Image: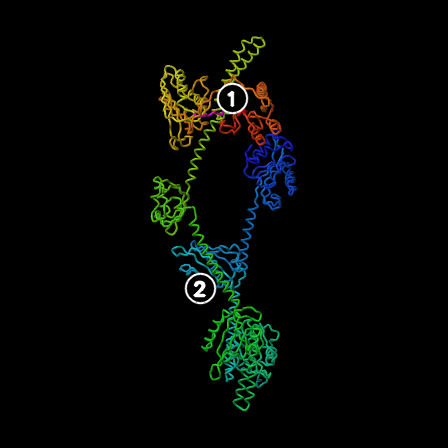
Amino acid sequence: MHDGETARLVREFDWSKTGLGPIEQWPQSLKTAVELTLATAVPVVLLLGPEGTLIYNDGYRDFAGKRHPQILGMPVLDAWPEVADFNRHVMDVCLAGGTLSPREMLMVLNRQGRMEDVWLDLDYSPIRDESGKPFGVFVTVVETTQKLLAERALRAREADLARAQQIGGVGGVEVDLVNGFKNRRSPEYLRIHGLPPEAANETHEDWVRRIHPEDRERTETQFLDAVKGDVRNYVSEYRIIRPNDGKERWISVRAEIERDELGRAIRLVGTHIDITDRKRSENALREETRALEILNKTGARIAAEHDLNNVVQTVIDAGVALTGAQFGAFFFNVVDDQGERYTLYNLAGVPPEKFEQFPMPRNTKVFAPTFAGDGIVRSDDILADPRYGKNEPYFGMPKGHLPVRSYLAVPVVARTGEVLGGLFFGHADTGVFTERSERLMTGLAGEAAVAIDNNRLFQEAQRELKERRLTEKALRESEERFRLIANSAPVPMWVSELGGTRAFVNQAYMEFLGVDYEEGLVYDWRKSLYPDDIPRILKEQVAGESSKKPFSLEMRVRNAQGEWRWIRSQSQPRWGPTGEHIGFIGVAYDITSSKQAETQLRHENLALEDAVAQRTRERDRIWSVSQDLLVIADLSGMWKQINPAWVSTLGWQESELLHRTSEWLEHPDDREKTRAEIAKLSSGTRTTRFENRCRHKDGSYRWLSWTAVPDDDLIFATARDITAEKEAAEILRETEEALRQSQKMEAVGQLTGGIAHDFNNLLQGIVGSLDLVKKRVSQGRIHEVERFVTGAMTSANRAAALTHRLLAFSRRQPLAPRTCQVNTVLASMEDLLRRSMGEQIWIEFQRDESTALSYCDQNQLENAILNLAINARDAMPDGGKLKITTRNTVIEKTSIPGLELPAGDYVEVIVADTGIGMTADVLDRAFEPFFTTKPIGQGTGLGLSMIYGFARQSEGTVVIRSTPGEGTAVSILLPKYEGAADSETEEVQASAAPHADDSEVVLVVEDETVVRSLIVEVLNELGYNVIEAVDGPSGLEILQSERHIDLLVTDIGLPGLNGRQIADAALTKRRDLKILFMTGYAENAALANGVLASGMEMITKPFAMDVFATRIREIIER
């Protein structure tokens, strides 16, 4: 079963208390499902049986949180009650053979002592038994909570950014200036420009076509000049016609142009803002300013004008300018000779002769109200006006009259209430005149009335000086009318005299400051100025008034509501009748919105500059901290700039690497291909995954993997150090090769059928001898029994020896390694070898007296040397020379291709002959089990294979060198031992089996009845108190009880719960328990003294009972 904390809990869990029953009774399908689950890395849980009993792996343990380990072995509905209904549905579907795969499923689970939202990807599939019937559910659990929450947070941040752009009305744009003006537009940009979402990557030409025809050439030229020039900031304002609604909109663009080191534009990043409202406000402000200037000029001119004709003409010209009319006229309220028509006095926009033959009809429904002083008449389309009739002569204009559609008429009323006449304005288009036109013309009519009155008064004064008082009264009335006009204006106005005292303030002025008229005249406006603005404003005011020229000021002023408002004041000088300067007339406009727009724009520019600076810093930091090797070179390969990673990777300083090519660093074998790759780059070809070696300052070489691209007569390249990957790949290749060889060798360890013949012969000797012993005992011929017992023991020992040799080959036989001097071993075998070779073989021993110690099983080494000597003898049927050499040798990594050993010091034993040698095919198969070139019956083919198994198990190997017709040399390589030699110990004498104390208790766990009975019998004879157990679970139950036990004797290869698992479980409760393992096939221990823990020992079957008794006594007394 798989190792791991959860696997251990599964092994130790008492499954007999569940519907699954004890582990040893589980069907193979269930065991396989559990093993697969425990070995799986992803979280997996099994829901087994009708109740869905839980078995899971380490991954699911982490998912379960604090509910682990309590839920192990629980029914799923009890383990997760908060989702019991869902799990009940899962069990119903999957036990019926169905599957479920919900994705991003939200569950509310209690894993850490609190309920929490958990999103999961789940896969449910049935587990089937040997008959194909579902008996459980296989569940994989992938938690996607963090991924889902991260994606939601990202979408929220993106939505916030888009909302911020939408709220701010800022559209983002990015233009790739290198590859044909490729554009990317933000959603707000698309909204501002009236574009659909698919236009986010529109072309440059699409943008140009959208620009207003009157602005198109100027705007595109300005953009192209900015790109071709050397400026970084690009600012533009232009009009577009939106495709979605055909409306004309004003756009303000502010952008930064990124340039490369040569100053060429590579990218533009900027913002687009719809400034249509601002433009309209500015236009309206200009119109108001223009209107005020016209009114001021008109008032100033007509106030001083004595010629009535000039007065009227000035008023008409001002009316046409203010209303946008095509023509205007003033008709005096004077009846002609027929008493039906009005007299035209002045005309603007057309020649007077156009009206000479068309006197104004008097009593039509359109014109009569004006001359009656009944108020303003305005019509968006006079032809559709019901007051305008077609029948002559009184209900329409005569044929040939000027084309009029828009119509506006304002009565001019004297201070006495007399209707002096009317101001009439017309236009050929409809809807030209507005309410603003009415307000302006009302004021202008008032000025006209004042002017006419003044003119009359002047004429009267000229004729009758004695009526001066009447004239002054009329003048005051005229000033009052001026007040009315000024008070009708929506912006603050004032009139100042020399010395700065105010003679007049209008209603808007008083409302702004929250004062009445008298307070307004004397109000110290400096009290309402923003403190920081006072010094500047006072200085500018003094300068402006001293110049006696128009001047303007911009300042922050607190209004009646306590708000700070930006105000722009404009002051015009006033002149007296004789041209002397008498003061100023002023007007103030609220420009807070424009100022706020300017401030916002300034902040956006600063933010954009900060963002660009931050990106530059981030790019520089990436260059500095990147672990990849970055380099910029010219097309010849000369390095112009490198990042710090080069110094840390190759050890050379920057000054040593720059201004030269890399040829001096390259490995000689790589220079030619590197030069060729640089030539390809120079021709415009990109480089990807090019590998070469560059020399470190310490003389070693580093493998580098390159990616490079040519651009603008430069090469931009990045390299990655792949030395460790190369070395790992080489180690992997060697390991895979070694694994294939070892797997081939180990596979034969399972092929016991190949030695059935030898075992049958040995068993025949054992069975036959025991059969004769039985007969002689029954016949009472006891004196003849010893000969047959000796024969049985001989056959048994030969069988044990064969088993040991086979297990050593398969690397499963536990060796008894110790320090070994190979020269001593060879010296002890010299007589045996000489007798074995015969008279035709000349033997030479060449022992290097400095040969170091090794660490191996000495008996196996003797067998290996003997086997090789016999093979050499068989290879020299006509005689020859056998040479056995010992020496020290050093193995380097590359000294022997394909060698399975790490580099280091080794002891080498070489057995060389002058025999027939081996062909290449035979040499390739020499270590294969059961492969032999000897005739049938003269060899098993296991000799070299078992020698190889012994050497590999001792951390060495065997190397064969052979040439057909010249002979063969076989080298056994064993690792050099650096420690001191082991002290010699006497062999255990089998004749003195020690007895036990009466109180000593031994637990014997053995599943083979005959073996267990023999062991129990021997131990009872020696005086031990013996407890028997027939398998692992029953033995473990005894160990977990309170009974006293001195020693555990257990077979290590028990089915189900093996001996090692019993021992590990027992030690959790009995820490000082001593343990003796019995084994005939050591699956889990390669070396007896290298794997077993303190207090554990091992004895290999078959063993003599007196040797077994001695080992038990030694272990108990130790």
Q: Is residue 975 magenta?
A: no
Say which amino acid is labelled 1: Gly
Q: Pointer 1: residues within 10 angstroms few (<14), some, or many (20+)?
A: few
First along the sequence among labels 1 and 2: 2
Residue placed most toward the observer, 7 or 886? 886
Instruction: Give the residue at mark 2.
Output: 218
Query: Between residues 459 and 1023, which one lies in front from this camera angle?
Result: 1023
**In this rendering, does residue 96 appear at all?**
no
Q: Are marks 1 and 2 in contact (CB under 8 Å)?
A: no
Q: Looking at the image, which residue is at 55% across and 36% down? A: 40
Query: Mainly helix, strand or loop, the magenta region?
Result: loop
Q: Around disc 2, counting alpha carbons within 10 Å, would you say few (fewer than 14), some (14 to 19), or many (20 or more)?
A: few
| Residue labelled with disc 1 | 753
Residue appearing at x 42%, y 30% in the figure: 901
Relative to residue 203, is residue 1048 depicted above or below? Answer: above
> Which residue is located at x 53 percent, y 12 percent?
788
Q: Is residue 817 magenta?
A: yes
- Front one among 24 and 428: 24
Q: Quadrant of the N terminus?
A: top right
The magenta-colored residue range is: 813-819
Secondary structure of the residue carrying numbered label 2: helix
- 836, above or below 739, in the image: above
Q: Nearer the viewer, residue 460 or 979?
A: 979
